[in-house]
Image: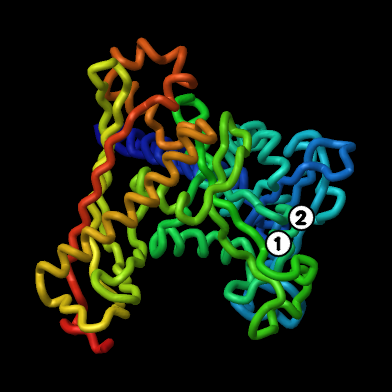
């Protein structure tokens, strides 16, 4: 018995050692097989897609990549030069153009940190769906990339414009959209995965934020533009662009864009301006919250009816009205009704434009009827394009003013 125990112990020790070696080998193999060193990669922050102006090929593709050795300077120019560079190539597909770029860069393009996709106006009119296939199909590219339409400029020009607030232009454009969504609500974030989802559902048309260049576009590709107190050119958000079956059909106005945000429940915070109740001047109300509910029904004649209920809450932020006693509840109710009219006007404007003129179901009314009234949808599904312009709507807005700041009466006399 005494001889057997040491032998069993030795055998167990050997087995344990072999298992430990195998586990260590697995860990090493699985953790390092796809290791990529930063100094061998070119991190793509933004992609731009235009139609090829020469007509020889379908697309002109631009990549904005980070120069790691220069980006460490933060918001200032590094001594060595710019924080980013761009590569541009043509191809009949996005994949073809990207592979052609290997002739111009010594590093492999790396897309895991890409934040922004800008599509030129003409390319968007030709159709955005084919441009997204590579992004959705490739596991190395994230599907939450924000999408914008370049208005009045090419995507290439947008990505070659230097910016002051951020050394990486793609970051500044992305963050501007994010700030606008949270503080004004005129534009809202639309990602690749959002467009893909709507395309697959086939019951709602997509709207995408547009971006333009304010100033001299030719001056953007110059470091001097970053060093001026007031730059010669800078990216600026435009209004929402509306598409049908993935093809750009037009751009909304400021009021229509705001109305679309109200309809889709995208307004997280915004500012409303209205005339003074009993005098000249204006007062400003900040909307802090807004609950939006849409429901589907049908009239006695069998026509679909969409009920829209918007319930904003806000506070008085600025008063240019003489002797307006905002410390009285009756006056706050009056201000609330004035804001109701302003919101109703914005919503009615966008309904007329999209439903009656462009005939685009960007609101998702078809999907709403399909979800809430399947029997009704079954009868109008095949004729939705002709039925949609006849759909009735009932709009109700009720604004509640909850705060007037630290001052009651106005100092304006």
Question: Does the residue at mark 1 contact the one at mark 2 (Cβ under 8 Å)?
Answer: yes
Residue wearing tag 1:
39
Q: In the figure, residue 322 lies in which quadrant?
A: bottom left
Q: Secondary structure at mark 2?
A: loop
Of labels 1 and 2, the one closer to you: 2
| Label of residue 237 in the image | none
Of residues 202 and 164, which is closer to you in this image?
Answer: 202
**Which residue is located at x 27 percent, y 54 percent?**
290
Give coordinates of residue 388: x percent, y percent: 43, 25
Whether residue 22 appears in this view of the structure is no
Question: Extreme left residue here?
Answer: 329
390 on left or right of 202: left
**Which residue is located at x 20 percent, y 52 percent?**
398
Q: In the figure, residue 90 lies in which quadrant?
A: top right
Residue wearing tag 2:
107
- Tell me the quadrant of the picture where the N terminus can be found: top left
Q: Residues within 10 Å of mark 2 (few under 14, many from 20)?
A: few
In this view, 140 is above or below 369: below
Task: Give me the C-alpha separation between circle 1 and circle 2.
Answer: 8 Å
339 on left or right of 47: left
Q: Residues within 10 Å of mark 1 (few under 14, many from 20)?
A: few
- Tell me the quadrant of the picture where the C terminus can be found: bottom left
Of residues 67 and 345, which is closer to you in this image?
Answer: 345
Q: In the figure, residue 363 lies in which quadrant?
A: top left
Badge 1 or badge 2: first in the primary sequence? 1
Whether residue 85 appears in this view of the structure is yes
In this view, 99 is above or below 166: above
């Amino acid at each position: 018995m005494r001889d057997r125990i040491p032998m069993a112990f030795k055998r167990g020790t050997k087995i344990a050692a072999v298992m430990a070696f195998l586990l260590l080998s697995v860990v090493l193999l699985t953790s390092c097989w796809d290791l990529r060193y930063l100094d061998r990669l070119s991190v793509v922050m933004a992609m731009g897609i235009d139609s090829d102006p020469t007509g020889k090929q379908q697309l002109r593709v631009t990549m904005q990549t980070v120069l790691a050795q220069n980006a460490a300077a933060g918001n200032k120019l590094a001594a060595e030069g710019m924080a980013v560079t761009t590569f541009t190539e043509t191809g009949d597909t996005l994949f073809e153009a990207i592979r052609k770029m290997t002739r111009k860069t010594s590093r492999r393009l790396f897309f895991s940190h890409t934040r922004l996709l800008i599509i030129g106006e003409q390319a968007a009119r030709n159709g955005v769906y084919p441009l997204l296939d590579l992004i959705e199909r490739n596991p190395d590219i994230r599907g939450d990339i924000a999408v914008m339409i370049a208005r009045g400029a090419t995507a290439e020009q947008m990505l070659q414009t230097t910016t002051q607030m951020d050394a990486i232009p793609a970051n500044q454009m992305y963050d501007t959209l994010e700030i606008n969504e949270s503080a004004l609500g005129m534009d809202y974030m639309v990602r690749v995965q959002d467009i893909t989802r709507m395309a697959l559902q086939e019951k709602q048309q997509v709207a995408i934020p547009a971006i333009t260049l304010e100033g001299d576009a030719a001056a953007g590709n110059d470091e001097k533009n970053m060093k001026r107190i007031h730059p010669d050119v800078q990216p600026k958000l435009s209004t929402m662009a509306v598409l049908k079956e993935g093809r750009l059909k037009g751009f909304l106005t400021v009021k229509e864009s705001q109305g679309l945000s109200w309809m889709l429940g995208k307004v997280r915070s915004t500012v409303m301006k209205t005339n003074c109740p009993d005098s000249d001047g204006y007062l400003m109300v900040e909307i802090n919250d807004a609950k939006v509910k849409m429901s589907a029904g049908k009239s006695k004649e069998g026509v679909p009816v969409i009920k829209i209920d918007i319930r904003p809450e806000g506070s008085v932020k600025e008063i240019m009205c003489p002797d307006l006693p905002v410390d009285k509840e009756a006056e706050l109710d009056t201000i609330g009704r004035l804001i109701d009219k302003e919101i109703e006007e914005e919503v009615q404007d966008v309904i007329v434009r999209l439903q009656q003129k462009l005939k685009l179901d960007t609101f998702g009314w078809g999907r709403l009827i399909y979800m809430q009234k399947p029997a009704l949808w079954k009868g109008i599904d095949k004729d939705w394009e002709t039925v949609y312009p006849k759909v009735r709507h009932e709009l109700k807005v009720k604004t509640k003013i909850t705060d007037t700041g630290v001052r009651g009466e106005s100092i304006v006399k």
